[in-house]
Amino acid sequence: MAVVDDDVVTGTEDRGRSPVRSGSRTVALVWVLILAVIAVIATLGVVGTRLYDARHDQQRDDQVLEVTRDVVAGLVSLDYERSKADLDRIKSVSTGAFQQQFDQLAASFSQVLSSGEVRSTGSVKEAGIVDADDDSASVLAAVSSVVKNTEAPDGQQRVYRMRVELERSDDDWKVSNVEFVS
């Protein structure tokens, strides 16, 4: 007596794979794709945040350097004939201890300018940020000026290095300290 297998083999059967095993591969593939999408989104978020922060820092640094250049040029560009306007301009961009000190010395400084017929024209040759955050900044500036007065009517060249401390006041940067450095 012979035993006959009743199974009929067709060409469409999945040889050696069970339906459960094929389904688990599909689920694993879906999870891998989900994790890959999450990784791409997280990477884009990190890169986007870094780009935003870098642009924000660059804009802040540009503002700090612009204010520093303007203030320092103003400090060394004075004219005895318009000393009140010059001193008011400096006062308008100062704050804190520097503003208090400047207020105390402004009247006598104006007298010195007038009595010596001082005319000084200066500019910032270079300026660089030492340290900066969203609330304060420290900048070094190389400055030159030509000072004319009763003792030097043809003018004297002067070169300075200044350390300028700035603080954020609302939307503006103001000078909180100026030091001459060597």
Image (cartoon, grey):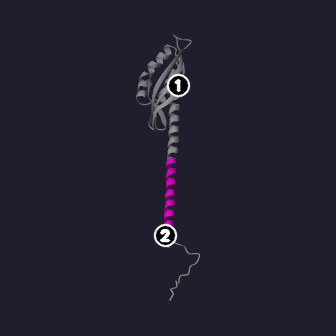
128 to 157, vertically: above or below: below
Residue 84 appears in view: no
Q: Is residue 30 magenta?
A: yes
SS majority, magenta: helix
Tag 1–tag 2 contact (CB < 8 Å): no
Check residue 125 in the rendering and tell me which mark sits there, or answer none: none
Q: Front-most of 47 and 158?
A: 47
Quickly name the residue at label 1. 73
Question: Where, quadrant-wise, is the C terminus in this rendering?
Answer: top left
Check residue 21 in the rendering and tell me which mark sits there, or answer none: 2
35 to 48, vertically: above or below: below
Residue interval drawn in magenta: 21-48
Q: Front-most of 32 and 68?
A: 32
As helix, strand or loop, the secondary structure at mark 1 comes to helix
33 to 13, vertically: above or below: above
Q: Front-most of 12 and 69?
A: 12
Q: Residues within 10 Å of mark 2 (few under 14, many from 20)?
A: few
Dot 2 amino acid type: Arg
Q: Is residue 95 magenta?
A: no
